[in-house]
Protein backbone atom coordinates (compact mmCIF):
# COMPACT_ATOMS: atom_id res chain seq x y z
CA UNK A 1 0.00 0.00 0.00
CA UNK A 2 1.43 3.27 -1.00
CA UNK A 3 -1.06 5.68 0.43
CA UNK A 4 0.77 8.64 1.87
CA UNK A 5 0.38 8.87 5.62
CA UNK A 6 -0.34 12.48 6.57
CA UNK A 7 1.98 13.89 9.19
CA UNK A 8 0.13 13.84 12.50
CA UNK A 9 -1.09 17.22 13.61
CA UNK A 10 0.18 17.79 17.18
CA UNK A 11 -3.10 19.52 18.14
CA UNK A 12 -5.11 16.65 16.77
CA UNK A 13 -3.31 13.37 17.43
CA UNK A 14 -6.02 11.33 15.68
CA UNK A 15 -6.52 12.47 12.13
CA UNK A 16 -10.15 13.25 11.42
CA UNK A 17 -11.55 10.46 9.34
CA UNK A 18 -15.04 9.88 8.07
CA UNK A 19 -16.61 9.41 11.42
CA UNK A 20 -19.35 7.14 10.28
CA UNK A 21 -18.86 4.09 8.08
CA UNK A 22 -20.76 3.93 4.80
CA UNK A 23 -23.10 1.32 6.19
CA UNK A 24 -24.60 3.97 8.45
CA UNK A 25 -25.35 6.29 5.55
CA UNK A 26 -26.95 3.52 3.59
CA UNK A 27 -28.95 2.36 6.61
CA UNK A 28 -30.13 5.92 7.03
CA UNK A 29 -31.77 5.91 3.65
CA UNK A 30 -33.69 2.73 4.38
CA UNK A 31 -34.72 3.85 7.87
CA UNK A 32 -36.10 7.11 6.53
CA UNK A 33 -37.64 5.60 3.42
CA UNK A 34 -40.06 3.25 5.16
CA UNK A 35 -42.05 5.81 7.22
CA UNK A 36 -41.58 8.39 4.45
CA UNK A 37 -43.15 6.14 1.86
CA UNK A 38 -45.96 5.17 4.22
CA UNK A 39 -46.87 8.81 4.88
CA UNK A 40 -46.64 9.74 1.20
CA UNK A 41 -48.95 6.90 0.28
CA UNK A 42 -51.46 7.10 3.12
CA UNK A 43 -51.35 10.73 4.12
CA UNK A 44 -50.35 12.95 1.20
CA UNK A 45 -51.66 11.02 -1.79
CA UNK A 46 -55.21 10.83 -0.34
CA UNK A 47 -55.44 14.63 -0.41
CA UNK A 48 -54.65 14.64 -4.10
CA UNK A 49 -57.43 12.11 -4.63
CA UNK A 50 -59.88 14.16 -2.58
CA UNK A 51 -58.99 17.18 -4.71
CA UNK A 52 -59.50 15.14 -7.87
CA UNK A 53 -62.89 13.82 -6.79
CA UNK A 54 -64.03 17.27 -5.69
CA UNK A 55 -63.76 18.23 -9.36
CA UNK A 56 -65.90 15.32 -10.51
CA UNK A 57 -69.65 15.02 -10.94
CA UNK A 58 -71.78 12.64 -8.91
CA UNK A 59 -72.86 9.50 -10.72
CA UNK A 60 -75.10 6.65 -9.76
CA UNK A 61 -72.47 3.98 -10.13
CA UNK A 62 -69.66 2.29 -8.25
CA UNK A 63 -67.61 4.42 -7.48
CA UNK A 64 -70.25 7.18 -7.46
CA UNK A 65 -68.46 9.89 -9.41
CA UNK A 66 -67.29 10.61 -12.95
CA UNK A 67 -63.66 9.80 -13.82
CA UNK A 68 -61.21 12.67 -14.30
CA UNK A 69 -60.63 11.70 -17.93
CA UNK A 70 -63.57 10.78 -20.09
CA UNK A 71 -63.64 7.79 -22.45
CA UNK A 72 -62.25 9.98 -25.23
CA UNK A 73 -59.37 11.08 -23.01
CA UNK A 74 -60.71 14.58 -22.49
CA UNK A 75 -60.36 16.23 -19.10
CA UNK A 76 -63.67 16.21 -17.21
CA UNK A 77 -63.15 18.64 -14.39
CA UNK A 78 -65.84 20.92 -13.07
CA UNK A 79 -65.96 23.55 -10.40
CA UNK A 80 -69.70 22.99 -9.99
CA UNK A 81 -69.29 21.49 -6.51
CA UNK A 82 -67.43 24.54 -5.26
CA UNK A 83 -69.96 26.85 -6.89
CA UNK A 84 -72.66 24.87 -5.13
CA UNK A 85 -70.90 25.33 -1.76
CA UNK A 86 -70.61 29.03 -2.41
CA UNK A 87 -74.18 29.56 -3.54
CA UNK A 88 -75.99 27.37 -1.06
CA UNK A 89 -76.31 29.37 2.11
CA UNK A 90 -76.10 26.30 4.35
CA UNK A 91 -72.40 25.63 3.78
CA UNK A 92 -71.14 29.17 4.42
CA UNK A 93 -73.23 29.30 7.60
CA UNK A 94 -71.81 25.94 8.69
CA UNK A 95 -68.20 27.06 8.11
CA UNK A 96 -68.72 30.33 10.00
CA UNK A 97 -70.58 28.57 12.78
CA UNK A 98 -67.80 25.99 13.17
CA UNK A 99 -65.21 28.74 13.42
CA UNK A 100 -67.30 30.55 16.01
CA UNK A 101 -68.00 27.47 18.13
CA UNK A 102 -64.38 26.30 17.98
CA UNK A 103 -63.02 29.80 18.67
CA UNK A 104 -65.21 30.46 21.71
CA UNK A 105 -64.47 26.98 23.07
CA UNK A 106 -60.74 27.57 22.63
CA UNK A 107 -61.09 30.76 24.63
CA UNK A 108 -63.01 28.92 27.35
CA UNK A 109 -60.31 26.25 27.45
CA UNK A 110 -57.72 28.98 27.88
CA UNK A 111 -59.69 30.68 30.66
CA UNK A 112 -60.08 27.43 32.60
CA UNK A 113 -56.77 25.85 31.58
CA UNK A 114 -54.39 28.72 32.22
CA UNK A 115 -55.07 29.10 35.97
CA UNK A 116 -54.96 25.31 36.29
CA UNK A 117 -51.61 25.02 34.49
CA UNK A 118 -50.26 27.91 36.54
CA UNK A 119 -51.47 26.37 39.78
CA UNK A 120 -49.88 23.05 38.81
CA UNK A 121 -46.57 24.72 38.00
CA UNK A 122 -46.65 26.49 41.38
CA UNK A 123 -47.57 23.35 43.32
CA UNK A 124 -44.90 21.55 45.37
CA UNK A 125 -42.82 19.29 43.09
CA UNK A 126 -44.03 16.08 44.72
CA UNK A 127 -47.62 17.02 43.97
CA UNK A 128 -46.93 18.14 40.38
CA UNK A 129 -46.57 14.67 38.89
CA UNK A 130 -49.81 13.55 40.48
CA UNK A 131 -51.68 16.59 39.19
CA UNK A 132 -50.19 15.99 35.75
CA UNK A 133 -51.38 12.38 35.84
CA UNK A 134 -54.84 13.61 36.83
CA UNK A 135 -54.95 15.91 33.80
CA UNK A 136 -53.79 13.18 31.41
CA UNK A 137 -56.07 10.46 32.78
CA UNK A 138 -59.36 11.68 31.20
CA UNK A 139 -57.55 12.00 27.89
CA UNK A 140 -56.87 8.26 27.96
CA UNK A 141 -60.47 7.31 28.65
CA UNK A 142 -62.83 7.13 25.72
CA UNK A 143 -63.59 10.46 24.09
CA UNK A 144 -66.97 9.22 22.91
CA UNK A 145 -67.98 8.13 26.40
CA UNK A 146 -66.91 11.42 27.95
CA UNK A 147 -69.14 13.28 25.49
CA UNK A 148 -71.90 10.79 26.25
CA UNK A 149 -71.56 11.60 29.96
CA UNK A 150 -72.73 15.16 29.24
CA UNK A 151 -75.91 13.83 27.61
CA UNK A 152 -76.92 12.46 30.99
CA UNK A 153 -76.05 15.73 32.72
CA UNK A 154 -77.58 18.27 30.35
CA UNK A 155 -80.80 16.52 29.37
CA UNK A 156 -84.18 17.97 30.32
CA UNK A 157 -84.52 15.25 32.93
CA UNK A 158 -80.76 15.17 33.46
CA UNK A 159 -78.64 15.79 36.53
CA UNK A 160 -78.51 19.59 36.44
CA UNK A 161 -82.19 20.10 35.73
CA UNK A 162 -83.19 17.53 38.36
CA UNK A 163 -80.97 19.24 40.89
CA UNK A 164 -82.31 22.72 40.14
CA UNK A 165 -85.90 21.48 40.09
CA UNK A 166 -85.35 19.67 43.38
CA UNK A 167 -83.93 22.80 44.97
CA UNK A 168 -86.87 24.80 43.68
CA UNK A 169 -84.65 27.26 41.78
CA UNK A 170 -86.60 26.66 38.59
CA UNK A 171 -90.02 25.19 38.03
CA UNK A 172 -89.49 23.83 34.56
CA UNK A 173 -86.37 22.33 33.03
CA UNK A 174 -83.97 24.56 31.14
CA UNK A 175 -83.28 23.42 27.59
CA UNK A 176 -79.53 22.75 27.50
CA UNK A 177 -79.17 19.67 25.31
CA UNK A 178 -79.25 20.28 21.55
CA UNK A 179 -78.09 23.88 21.90
CA UNK A 180 -74.87 25.73 21.15
CA UNK A 181 -74.30 25.87 24.91
CA UNK A 182 -74.00 22.06 25.02
CA UNK A 183 -71.46 22.15 22.18
CA UNK A 184 -69.36 24.74 24.01
CA UNK A 185 -69.37 22.57 27.11
CA UNK A 186 -68.58 19.45 25.09
CA UNK A 187 -65.63 20.91 23.20
CA UNK A 188 -64.20 22.72 26.23
CA UNK A 189 -64.46 19.59 28.32
CA UNK A 190 -63.00 17.19 25.75
CA UNK A 191 -60.10 19.38 24.65
CA UNK A 192 -59.11 20.93 28.01
CA UNK A 193 -56.13 18.59 28.57
CA UNK A 194 -54.70 19.64 25.17
CA UNK A 195 -54.69 23.22 26.43
CA UNK A 196 -53.27 22.50 29.88
CA UNK A 197 -50.34 20.31 28.85
CA UNK A 198 -48.41 22.78 26.62
CA UNK A 199 -49.20 25.63 29.02
CA UNK A 200 -47.88 23.63 31.94
CA UNK A 201 -44.75 22.67 29.99
CA UNK A 202 -43.96 26.36 29.45
CA UNK A 203 -44.96 27.63 32.90
CA UNK A 204 -43.07 24.92 34.75
CA UNK A 205 -39.80 25.91 33.11
CA UNK A 206 -40.34 29.60 33.75
CA UNK A 207 -37.63 30.96 36.06
CA UNK A 208 -39.24 32.13 39.29
CA UNK A 209 -36.58 34.71 40.13
CA UNK A 210 -37.81 37.26 37.58
CA UNK A 211 -41.20 37.49 39.28
CA UNK A 212 -39.56 37.51 42.68
CA UNK A 213 -37.26 40.34 41.67
CA UNK A 214 -40.20 42.34 40.37
CA UNK A 215 -42.07 41.83 43.62
CA UNK A 216 -39.01 42.74 45.70
CA UNK A 217 -38.91 45.97 43.76
CA UNK A 218 -42.49 46.65 44.83
CA UNK A 219 -44.45 45.30 41.90
CA UNK A 220 -47.96 44.11 42.69
CA UNK A 221 -48.43 40.35 42.12
CA UNK A 222 -51.01 40.88 39.38
CA UNK A 223 -48.82 43.37 37.62
CA UNK A 224 -45.79 41.09 37.86
CA UNK A 225 -47.93 38.35 36.34
CA UNK A 226 -49.18 40.56 33.52
CA UNK A 227 -45.78 42.01 32.61
CA UNK A 228 -43.56 38.96 33.12
CA UNK A 229 -45.28 35.59 33.34
CA UNK A 230 -47.99 36.17 30.76
CA UNK A 231 -45.71 37.37 27.91
CA UNK A 232 -43.24 34.56 28.61
CA UNK A 233 -45.98 31.97 28.39
CA UNK A 234 -47.23 33.08 24.96
CA UNK A 235 -45.67 30.07 23.15
CA UNK A 236 -47.66 27.77 25.42
CA UNK A 237 -50.84 29.76 24.81
CA UNK A 238 -50.39 29.53 21.04
CA UNK A 239 -49.55 25.82 21.12
CA UNK A 240 -52.51 24.96 23.32
CA UNK A 241 -54.93 27.10 21.33
CA UNK A 242 -53.92 25.51 18.02
CA UNK A 243 -54.18 22.01 19.49
CA UNK A 244 -57.74 22.80 20.56
CA UNK A 245 -58.93 25.01 17.71
CA UNK A 246 -57.88 23.04 14.62
CA UNK A 247 -59.49 19.68 15.45
CA UNK A 248 -62.49 21.40 17.07
CA UNK A 249 -63.42 23.18 13.82
CA UNK A 250 -63.90 19.82 12.10
CA UNK A 251 -65.49 18.13 15.12
CA UNK A 252 -68.21 15.60 14.36
CA UNK A 253 -69.01 13.60 17.51
CA UNK A 254 -69.76 16.56 19.79
CA UNK A 255 -72.21 18.43 17.53
CA UNK A 256 -73.99 15.24 16.54
CA UNK A 257 -74.49 14.04 20.14
CA UNK A 258 -74.94 17.33 21.99
CA UNK A 259 -75.89 19.85 19.30
CA UNK A 260 -79.33 20.57 17.96
CA UNK A 261 -80.59 20.55 14.39
CA UNK A 262 -79.76 24.23 13.91
CA UNK A 263 -76.27 24.19 15.45
CA UNK A 264 -74.51 23.35 12.20
CA UNK A 265 -70.88 22.34 12.18
CA UNK A 266 -69.00 21.56 9.03
CA UNK A 267 -67.75 18.16 10.20
CA UNK A 268 -71.34 17.04 10.57
CA UNK A 269 -72.31 18.52 7.20
CA UNK A 270 -69.48 16.57 5.55
CA UNK A 271 -70.58 13.39 7.30
CA UNK A 272 -74.21 13.82 6.21
CA UNK A 273 -73.17 14.68 2.67
CA UNK A 274 -71.16 11.49 2.52
CA UNK A 275 -73.25 8.97 4.47
CA UNK A 276 -76.68 10.55 4.02
CA UNK A 277 -76.71 11.98 0.52
CA UNK A 278 -73.97 9.67 -0.82
CA UNK A 279 -72.63 12.65 -2.72
CA UNK A 280 -68.89 11.97 -2.72
CA UNK A 281 -67.86 14.90 -4.94
CA UNK A 282 -69.62 17.47 -2.74
CA UNK A 283 -68.25 15.83 0.42
CA UNK A 284 -64.76 16.10 -1.12
CA UNK A 285 -65.31 19.75 -1.97
CA UNK A 286 -66.44 20.38 1.62
CA UNK A 287 -63.24 18.69 2.86
CA UNK A 288 -61.00 20.72 0.54
CA UNK A 289 -62.69 23.96 1.57
CA UNK A 290 -62.28 23.03 5.25
CA UNK A 291 -58.62 22.34 4.61
CA UNK A 292 -58.28 25.78 2.99
CA UNK A 293 -59.88 27.38 6.04
CA UNK A 294 -57.47 25.52 8.32
CA UNK A 295 -54.31 25.80 6.25
CA UNK A 296 -53.02 28.88 8.08
CA UNK A 297 -53.42 27.49 11.62
CA UNK A 298 -52.01 24.12 10.50
CA UNK A 299 -48.94 25.81 9.02
CA UNK A 300 -48.51 27.74 12.27
CA UNK A 301 -48.67 24.50 14.20
CA UNK A 302 -46.07 22.85 11.96
CA UNK A 303 -43.68 25.77 12.28
CA UNK A 304 -44.08 25.61 16.01
CA UNK A 305 -43.31 21.89 16.04
CA UNK A 306 -40.20 22.55 13.96
CA UNK A 307 -39.03 25.26 16.33
CA UNK A 308 -39.65 23.06 19.35
CA UNK A 309 -37.60 20.37 17.73
CA UNK A 310 -34.76 22.78 17.04
CA UNK A 311 -34.71 23.95 20.66
CA UNK B 1 -49.49 36.65 47.69
CA UNK B 2 -51.78 34.57 49.85
CA UNK B 3 -54.81 35.76 47.94
CA UNK B 4 -53.32 34.60 44.68
CA UNK B 5 -52.55 31.16 46.09
CA UNK B 6 -56.12 30.92 47.18
CA UNK B 7 -57.22 31.86 43.67
CA UNK B 8 -54.99 29.23 42.06
CA UNK B 9 -56.14 26.62 44.54
CA UNK B 10 -59.79 27.21 43.75
CA UNK B 11 -59.04 27.26 40.01
CA UNK B 12 -57.45 23.82 40.36
CA UNK B 13 -60.37 22.52 42.41
CA UNK B 14 -62.90 23.84 39.91
CA UNK B 15 -60.90 22.49 36.96
CA UNK B 16 -60.56 19.01 38.36
CA UNK B 17 -64.21 18.95 39.39
CA UNK B 18 -65.07 19.89 35.79
CA UNK B 19 -62.80 17.13 34.43
CA UNK B 20 -63.95 14.40 36.79
CA UNK B 21 -67.59 15.25 37.58
CA UNK B 22 -69.02 13.81 34.35
CA UNK B 23 -66.88 10.66 34.62
CA UNK B 24 -68.03 10.21 38.21
CA UNK B 25 -71.68 10.61 37.19
CA UNK B 26 -71.21 7.90 34.53
CA UNK B 27 -69.83 5.51 37.13
CA UNK B 28 -72.52 6.21 39.73
CA UNK B 29 -75.39 5.75 37.31
CA UNK B 30 -73.95 2.52 35.97
CA UNK B 31 -75.06 0.98 39.27
CA UNK B 32 -78.56 2.37 38.94
CA UNK B 33 -81.35 -0.20 38.92
CA UNK B 34 -83.69 2.10 36.98
CA UNK B 35 -83.67 2.17 33.21
CA UNK B 36 -84.13 5.94 33.33
CA UNK B 37 -80.48 6.82 33.60
CA UNK B 38 -80.91 9.87 35.79
CA UNK B 39 -83.59 8.65 38.20
CA UNK B 40 -82.08 6.69 41.06
CA UNK B 41 -83.82 3.36 41.47
CA UNK B 42 -81.53 1.64 43.94
CA UNK B 43 -78.18 -0.13 43.65
CA UNK B 44 -77.85 -2.84 41.06
CA UNK B 45 -75.26 -4.47 38.82
CA UNK B 46 -77.77 -5.69 36.28
CA UNK B 47 -76.41 -3.49 33.47
CA UNK B 48 -73.04 -5.18 33.75
CA UNK B 49 -74.76 -8.50 33.22
CA UNK B 50 -76.63 -7.17 30.20
CA UNK B 51 -73.43 -5.74 28.82
CA UNK B 52 -71.65 -9.08 28.94
CA UNK B 53 -74.64 -10.87 27.44
CA UNK B 54 -74.75 -8.52 24.45
CA UNK B 55 -72.92 -10.37 21.66
CA UNK B 56 -72.78 -7.26 19.48
CA UNK B 57 -70.80 -5.34 22.12
CA UNK B 58 -68.53 -8.26 22.97
CA UNK B 59 -67.69 -8.93 19.30
CA UNK B 60 -67.04 -5.26 18.66
CA UNK B 61 -64.83 -5.00 21.75
CA UNK B 62 -62.76 -8.02 20.69
CA UNK B 63 -62.41 -6.62 17.17
CA UNK B 64 -61.33 -3.24 18.54
CA UNK B 65 -58.76 -4.83 20.85
CA UNK B 66 -57.34 -6.83 17.95
CA UNK B 67 -57.12 -3.81 15.64
CA UNK B 68 -55.69 -1.76 18.50
CA UNK B 69 -52.89 -4.21 19.23
CA UNK B 70 -51.85 -4.69 15.59
CA UNK B 71 -52.06 -0.95 14.99
CA UNK B 72 -49.97 -0.10 18.05
CA UNK B 73 -47.24 -2.56 17.09
CA UNK B 74 -46.91 -1.23 13.54
CA UNK B 75 -47.25 2.37 14.69
CA UNK B 76 -44.39 1.92 17.18
CA UNK B 77 -42.15 0.38 14.50
CA UNK B 78 -42.85 3.09 11.92
CA UNK B 79 -42.97 5.92 14.45
CA UNK B 80 -39.60 4.92 15.91
CA UNK B 81 -37.99 4.93 12.47
CA UNK B 82 -39.54 8.33 11.79
CA UNK B 83 -38.42 9.77 15.15
CA UNK B 84 -34.92 8.41 14.59
CA UNK B 85 -34.77 9.93 11.11
CA UNK B 86 -35.83 13.36 12.36
CA UNK B 87 -33.55 13.61 15.40
CA UNK B 88 -30.44 11.64 14.44
CA UNK B 89 -29.92 11.98 10.71
CA UNK B 90 -29.41 15.71 10.41
CA UNK B 91 -30.59 17.19 7.15
CA UNK B 92 -31.78 15.08 4.28
CA UNK B 93 -33.68 15.79 1.13
CA UNK B 94 -37.38 16.26 1.76
CA UNK B 95 -36.97 16.67 5.51
CA UNK B 96 -39.37 19.63 5.63
CA UNK B 97 -42.10 17.62 3.93
CA UNK B 98 -41.39 14.69 6.23
CA UNK B 99 -41.69 16.70 9.46
CA UNK B 100 -44.80 18.35 8.05
CA UNK B 101 -46.40 14.97 7.40
CA UNK B 102 -45.55 13.93 10.97
CA UNK B 103 -47.04 17.07 12.55
CA UNK B 104 -50.18 17.42 10.45
CA UNK B 105 -52.00 14.21 11.53
CA UNK B 106 -51.86 15.41 15.15
CA UNK B 107 -54.32 18.22 14.47
CA UNK B 108 -56.01 17.18 11.22
CA UNK B 109 -59.80 17.03 11.70
CA UNK B 110 -60.87 13.40 11.68
CA UNK B 111 -63.55 13.83 9.03
CA UNK B 112 -60.89 14.95 6.54
CA UNK B 113 -58.52 12.08 7.35
CA UNK B 114 -61.37 9.58 7.21
CA UNK B 115 -62.79 10.77 3.91
CA UNK B 116 -59.40 11.08 2.23
CA UNK B 117 -58.31 7.58 3.28
CA UNK B 118 -61.58 6.07 2.12
CA UNK B 119 -61.23 7.71 -1.29
CA UNK B 120 -57.64 6.45 -1.46
CA UNK B 121 -58.73 2.88 -0.73
CA UNK B 122 -61.51 3.05 -3.31
CA UNK B 123 -59.13 4.43 -5.93
CA UNK B 124 -56.43 1.88 -5.12
CA UNK B 125 -58.96 -0.92 -5.40
CA UNK B 126 -60.06 0.16 -8.84
CA UNK B 127 -56.50 0.76 -10.06
CA UNK B 128 -54.41 -2.05 -8.55
CA UNK B 129 -57.10 -4.31 -7.11
CA UNK B 130 -55.92 -3.88 -3.52
CA UNK B 131 -57.38 -3.67 -0.89
CA UNK B 132 -60.29 -5.79 -2.09
CA UNK B 133 -63.23 -4.42 -0.17
CA UNK B 134 -63.02 -2.53 3.09
CA UNK B 135 -62.93 -3.81 6.64
CA UNK B 136 -60.41 -4.72 9.30
CA UNK B 137 -57.36 -4.18 7.07
CA UNK B 138 -58.35 -0.71 5.94
CA UNK B 139 -59.25 0.36 9.49
CA UNK B 140 -55.87 -0.87 10.72
CA UNK B 141 -53.96 0.96 7.98
CA UNK B 142 -55.87 4.16 8.69
CA UNK B 143 -55.15 3.88 12.41
CA UNK B 144 -51.46 3.18 11.87
CA UNK B 145 -51.19 6.31 9.75
CA UNK B 146 -52.35 8.71 12.44
CA UNK B 147 -50.97 6.86 15.47
CA UNK B 148 -47.46 6.62 14.05
CA UNK B 149 -47.32 10.42 14.10
CA UNK B 150 -48.01 10.42 17.85
CA UNK B 151 -45.37 7.73 18.42
CA UNK B 152 -42.86 9.66 16.31
CA UNK B 153 -43.40 12.79 18.44
CA UNK B 154 -42.94 10.86 21.70
CA UNK B 155 -39.81 9.06 20.44
CA UNK B 156 -38.45 12.28 19.03
CA UNK B 157 -38.83 14.19 22.30
CA UNK B 158 -37.16 11.33 24.19
CA UNK B 159 -34.27 11.19 21.70
CA UNK B 160 -33.70 14.92 21.61
CA UNK B 161 -33.55 15.11 25.42
CA UNK B 162 -30.42 12.93 25.14
CA UNK B 163 -27.65 13.98 22.81
CA UNK B 164 -26.21 11.46 20.41
CA UNK B 165 -22.83 11.27 22.15
CA UNK B 166 -23.32 7.73 23.45
CA UNK B 167 -24.20 6.43 20.02
CA UNK B 168 -21.34 8.31 18.41
CA UNK B 169 -18.90 6.95 20.96
CA UNK B 170 -20.01 3.42 20.19
CA UNK B 171 -19.74 4.05 16.45
CA UNK B 172 -16.27 5.51 16.88
CA UNK B 173 -15.27 2.43 18.84
CA UNK B 174 -16.25 0.36 15.84
CA UNK B 175 -19.72 -0.96 16.64
CA UNK B 176 -21.92 -1.61 13.66
CA UNK B 177 -24.89 0.79 13.34
CA UNK B 178 -27.53 -1.87 13.89
CA UNK B 179 -25.67 -3.01 17.00
CA UNK B 180 -25.51 0.56 18.26
CA UNK B 181 -29.24 0.81 17.74
CA UNK B 182 -29.99 -2.45 19.56
CA UNK B 183 -27.56 -2.03 22.45
CA UNK B 184 -27.70 1.73 23.09
CA UNK B 185 -30.54 3.57 21.37
CA UNK B 186 -33.26 1.01 22.00
CA UNK B 187 -32.79 0.74 25.80
CA UNK B 188 -32.67 4.55 26.05
CA UNK B 189 -35.95 5.03 24.23
CA UNK B 190 -37.68 1.97 25.70
CA UNK B 191 -39.96 3.99 28.02
CA UNK B 192 -41.00 6.14 25.07
CA UNK B 193 -41.78 3.01 23.06
CA UNK B 194 -43.98 1.64 25.85
CA UNK B 195 -45.77 4.98 26.20
CA UNK B 196 -46.13 5.19 22.41
CA UNK B 197 -47.55 1.69 22.14
CA UNK B 198 -50.13 2.38 24.85
CA UNK B 199 -51.08 5.72 23.30
CA UNK B 200 -51.45 4.20 19.82
CA UNK B 201 -53.53 1.39 21.31
CA UNK B 202 -55.91 3.80 23.08
CA UNK B 203 -56.17 6.12 20.08
CA UNK B 204 -57.24 3.19 17.96
CA UNK B 205 -59.69 1.91 20.58
CA UNK B 206 -61.20 5.37 20.79
CA UNK B 207 -61.57 6.28 17.14
CA UNK B 208 -65.09 6.54 15.78
CA UNK B 209 -64.94 8.90 12.81
CA UNK B 210 -62.05 7.51 10.78
CA UNK B 211 -63.12 3.90 11.38
CA UNK B 212 -66.67 4.69 10.24
CA UNK B 213 -65.39 6.09 6.95
CA UNK B 214 -62.98 3.30 6.05
CA UNK B 215 -64.93 0.37 7.48
CA UNK B 216 -66.92 -2.00 5.36
CA UNK B 217 -69.92 -4.21 6.04
CA UNK B 218 -69.36 -6.60 8.91
CA UNK B 219 -66.52 -4.72 10.55
CA UNK B 220 -67.98 -2.68 13.42
CA UNK B 221 -65.56 -1.49 16.05
CA UNK B 222 -66.60 -0.80 19.63
CA UNK B 223 -66.95 3.00 19.20
CA UNK B 224 -69.14 2.44 16.14
CA UNK B 225 -71.49 0.19 18.10
CA UNK B 226 -71.51 2.54 21.10
CA UNK B 227 -72.21 5.53 18.88
CA UNK B 228 -75.17 3.88 17.20
CA UNK B 229 -76.54 3.06 20.68
CA UNK B 230 -76.09 6.49 22.29
CA UNK B 231 -77.27 8.36 19.23
CA UNK B 232 -80.77 7.24 20.13
CA UNK B 233 -80.41 8.43 23.73
CA UNK B 234 -78.76 7.42 26.97
CA UNK B 235 -78.59 3.71 27.69
CA UNK B 236 -77.44 2.30 31.03
CA UNK B 237 -75.31 -0.54 29.70
CA UNK B 238 -73.11 2.06 28.00
CA UNK B 239 -72.57 3.51 31.49
CA UNK B 240 -71.42 0.08 32.65
CA UNK B 241 -69.03 -0.13 29.69
CA UNK B 242 -67.68 3.33 30.49
CA UNK B 243 -67.06 2.34 34.10
CA UNK B 244 -65.08 -0.72 33.04
CA UNK B 245 -62.98 1.35 30.61
CA UNK B 246 -62.32 4.06 33.21
CA UNK B 247 -61.29 1.44 35.74
CA UNK B 248 -58.84 -0.30 33.37
CA UNK B 249 -57.36 2.95 32.12
CA UNK B 250 -56.86 4.47 35.55
CA UNK B 251 -55.19 1.31 36.79
CA UNK B 252 -52.86 1.25 33.79
CA UNK B 253 -52.06 4.96 34.01
CA UNK B 254 -51.45 4.90 37.75
CA UNK B 255 -49.20 1.83 37.56
CA UNK B 256 -47.20 3.07 34.57
CA UNK B 257 -46.96 6.58 36.04
CA UNK B 258 -45.65 5.17 39.28
CA UNK B 259 -43.13 2.99 37.43
CA UNK B 260 -41.99 5.93 35.36
CA UNK B 261 -41.53 8.23 38.35
CA UNK B 262 -39.60 5.50 40.14
CA UNK B 263 -37.23 4.82 37.24
CA UNK B 264 -36.73 8.55 36.75
CA UNK B 265 -35.78 8.93 40.42
CA UNK B 266 -33.39 6.02 40.15
CA UNK B 267 -31.80 7.56 37.07
CA UNK B 268 -31.38 10.89 38.84
CA UNK B 269 -29.82 9.16 41.82
CA UNK B 270 -27.44 7.27 39.57
CA UNK B 271 -26.42 10.48 37.84
CA UNK B 272 -25.84 12.18 41.18
CA UNK B 273 -23.79 9.26 42.47
CA UNK B 274 -21.73 9.23 39.31
CA UNK B 275 -21.07 12.95 39.65
CA UNK B 276 -20.19 12.58 43.35
CA UNK B 277 -17.81 9.73 42.54
CA UNK B 278 -16.03 11.80 39.92
CA UNK B 279 -15.34 14.85 42.08
Image (spheres, rainbow, N blue to C red):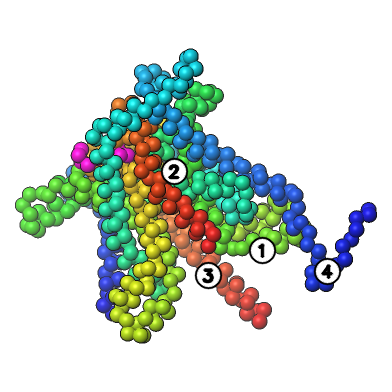
Return the residue nearer the eye: B34 or A23.
Answer: A23
Circle 2 residue: B204
Q: Are marks 2 and 1 on the same chain?
A: yes
Q: CA distance from mark 2 to mark 3?
A: 32 Å
Q: Which residue is mark 3?
A: B265
Q: Which badge, 2 or 1, comes first in the chain's sequence?
A: 1
Kindly identify which chain the residue marked by label 4 belongs to. A
Residue B157 place in picture, x, y as percent: 53, 58
User: Is the residue B219 above or below the residue B47 in the image?
Assistant: above
Q: Are marks 2 and 3 in contact (CB under 8 Å)?
A: no
Q: Nearer the viewer, mark 2 or mark 4?
A: 4
> How far is the residue under mark 2 from the one under mark 4?
58 Å
Residue B24's place in the image compared with B119, above or below, is: below
Residue B85 locus on image (x, y percent): 60, 50
Quick check: marks 1 and 3 in contact, CB under 8 Å?
no
Q: Is residue A229 visible?
A: yes
The answer to whether the residues at label 4 and label 3 have Cβ atoms under 8 Å apart is no
Horizontal side of residue B157 vs A22, given as left or right: left
x, y percent for residue B222:
38, 39
Amino acid sequence: MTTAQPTPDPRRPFPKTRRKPRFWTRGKGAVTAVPYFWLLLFFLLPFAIVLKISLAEPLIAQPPFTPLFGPDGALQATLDNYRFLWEDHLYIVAYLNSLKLAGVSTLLCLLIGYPMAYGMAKAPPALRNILLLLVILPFWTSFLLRVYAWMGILRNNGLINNLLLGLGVIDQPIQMMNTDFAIYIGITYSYLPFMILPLYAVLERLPGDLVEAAQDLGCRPWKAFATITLPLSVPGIIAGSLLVFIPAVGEFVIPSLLGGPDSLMIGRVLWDEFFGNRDWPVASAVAIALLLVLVVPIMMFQRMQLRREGA
Amino acid sequence: MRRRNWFLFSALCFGFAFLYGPILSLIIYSFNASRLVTVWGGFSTRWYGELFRDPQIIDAALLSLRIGAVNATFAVALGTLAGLAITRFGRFRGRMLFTGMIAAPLVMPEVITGLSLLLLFVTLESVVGWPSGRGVTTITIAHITFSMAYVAVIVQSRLSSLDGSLEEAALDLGARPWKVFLVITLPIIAPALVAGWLLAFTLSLDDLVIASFVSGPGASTLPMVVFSKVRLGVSPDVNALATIIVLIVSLAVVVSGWLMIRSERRRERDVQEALAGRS
